[in-house]
Amino acid sequence: MTKVKTHFEESDVLIVGGGMAGTGATFEARHWGKDLKIVCVEKANIDRSGAVAQGLYAINCYMGMQWNENQPEDHVRYARNDLMGMVREDLGYDMARHVDSTVHMFDEWGLPMMKNEKTGRYLREGKWQIMIHGESYKPIVAEAAKKSADKIYNRIMITHLLMDDEKENRIGGAVGFNMRTGDYHVFKAKTVIVAAGGASHIFKPRAVGEGMGRTWYAPWSNGSAYALPIAVGAKMTQMENRIVLCRFKDGYGPVGAYFLHLKTYTQNANGENYEKKWYDHTKNLVGEYIDHHPTPTCLRNHAFIQEVMAGGGPIHMVTTEAFQDPHLETVGWENFLGMTVGQAVVWASQNIDPKYTNPELTTSEPYVMGSHATCSGAWVSGPEDLSPPEYFWGYNRMLTVDGLFGAGDTVGGSAHKFSSGSFTEGRLAAKAAVKYIEDKKAEGIKVSDKQCSDLKEVIYKPLENYTVGRNEITGGTVSPSYISPIQGLQRLQRIMDEYVGGIATNYMTNENMLNRGLELLKWLEEDLENVGAEDYHQLMRAWELKHRTVTSQCVTEHTKFRTETRWPGYYYRGDHLKLDDKNWHCLTVSRRDPKTKEFTMEKVPVYHIVDEKKEKKAS
Ligand SMILES: Cc1cc2nc3c(=O)[nH]c(=O)nc-3n(C[C@H](O)[C@H](O)[C@H](O)COP(=O)(O)OP(=O)(O)OC[C@H]3O[C@@H](n4cnc5c(N)ncnc54)[C@H](O)[C@@H]3O)c2cc1C
């Protein structure tokens, strides 16, 4: 690897990932740290990166406090209900009380917002969502970040975090490589904010073969947000809480605007309201949670999955009524133009005009994320004015590694942030990171040359594996000495799919399956020492796969630990099919020892700080 050039950069605040949370963090870091050096490193190009790359049609988290439409408490109640009780209410409240100011800035920066003609307020799609013409959402927030940062590095994938060699458990920066030039980049930093998005493609997707790459969540979200902190021993929470989405079949087109704005509804193949049919069955599993309003997302999925398993499919969205109204018909189509053009193309190819044919729905493969209707991610400190002692260790959104912060999909426990809430959480993390520096907590950090050169060797090893191993190829592309990233990815996806509750088993798993899954994941991890990369793009694929694998191990450990089915419709523990509030009304927290790579698990109380002060401790 002597040919690879090394670049060094030193900064005060280093932001890993320039998506919604990363751009928010970059912007806010400049506000509080006028004289600080702020650097953002992005795997793609921040103008069109992350889950919002192709735009959005709605901002899904806006309180409307100025008009008393909702208050932060309302949002906490909503997220708590949707997650079957399991959220960090301090984090959710903190995000909600600041999110409106974020949206007002988007408006000032030129994001076209739809307005209600009668009231002049933002046009509501639902209780929390406001509608936008959002094709250029990402370039607009990227501009704010570009104006704020000292430097934005595009096309650099961060593969590892650097640790302080002087003081244990303190961050020292991050390293990665440029996917175009292959250069090695060392970013020494006083604080690091990880904002690298969620994880798709860890479970086998429904679309394989010719459709591979068509997933609901961004295919380039590869779990770096989890793997980077896990590798340095940061604690994670609720990693079992994967998300399954009900979406239009084959194109994963969103259904939110259809349900909320077009008032469409679902039915089984016989035209029946199947959700009612599964009421008693669901009540038997989860008790009174099925009577909550709105019905938690996972329980709606549950009825869908059960109905299909009982032979009532396909399930359809009834669009033929709403689409008779020309305005609603336009909204229905425009909804896809803003963010999922592919769904319109799928319908055209399948001869579906939703005005005359009710389109099919399906449930997706599971994803791991912290900003949507689930809250997997890092275990972080909350804000000092809200958080109980177990949830507070000095700096808002700081992980259990000193100087390491998180935001957006990275952060666990705070669901339903979406794009605006993720940007807001980036702002909160950046403010705290600046304070950490001002409080002189980052003095005297030392990152040795050895640490940097050791990691350099590790990062480029897949290129070495390929260069050496290709000599043994006797035909085709298969070498006895290395596996390619795509082979490794398909192996990972099958393990997760078949043992950890993917579509192959209708989201079902149990302790025996999880144990087997863990065993297979361990062997995969060993084999990934021999992953081969023929160029820098494949090197990125190799590192994406390694990050996905570590994330998957953590998901599997968490799923095994929680011996109940808390979220039927997201996954099922066949050996513990019922929700068990007596023992599991708590958050799960894990830590992987960086040396032994073994996970330890613990239960942490879930505190209900809105409405009820009383805490329910799990035994
Ligand atoms: C299909 C879809 C529809 C959605 N619809 C809506 C909606 O209608 N309204 C709404 O408000 N929200 C919506 N969301 C949610 C919203 O997009 C997310 O909540 C938000 O983008 C999360 O922000 P984030 O910064 O955590 O992740 P992202 O915005 O995904 O950003 C992560 C960034 O990190 C970069 N990155 C990843 N790994 C690395 C690495 N190793 N090194 C360097 N950089 C890295 C990525 O390239 C990316 O730019 C939707 C999401 C999806 C996928």
Image (cartoon, rainbow, N blue to C red):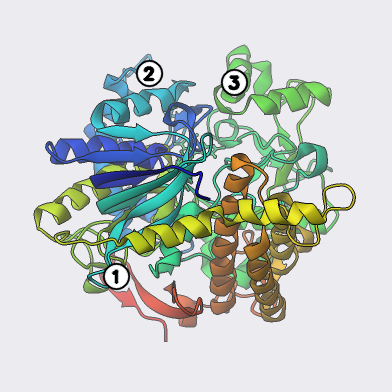
* Horizontal side of residue 420 vs 238, given as left or right: left
Amino acid type shown at disc 3 = Leu
| Residue assigned mark 1 | 169
Q: Which of 576 and 400 is in front in this view?
A: 400
Q: Please provide percent x and percent y for residue 106.
A: 32, 26
Q: State how far apart marks 2 and 1 are (Cα).
A: 49 Å
Q: Which residue lies furthest to the front in this view?
A: 2
Q: Which of 558 and 464 is in front in this view?
A: 464
- Tell me what residue is drawn at x 67 percent, y 75 percent: 514
Q: In which quarter of the image is residue 270?
A: top right
Is 129 located above or below residue 8 in the figure?
Answer: above
Judged by depth in the image, the label closer to the viewer, 2 or 1, is 1
Residue pointed to by mark 2 = 115
Relative placement, left or right, of 130 versus 253 is left
Q: Residue at x 72, y 52 (%)?
A: 484
Q: Label 1 sits on what residue type?
A: Asn
**3D distance between C-alphas at marks 3 and 1:** 46 Å
The secondary element bearing badge 2 is classed as: loop
When the figure is inspected, residue 501 is found, relative to residue 140, above or below; the finding is below
Task: Tell which residue pokes out farthest to the bottom in this image.
Answer: 619
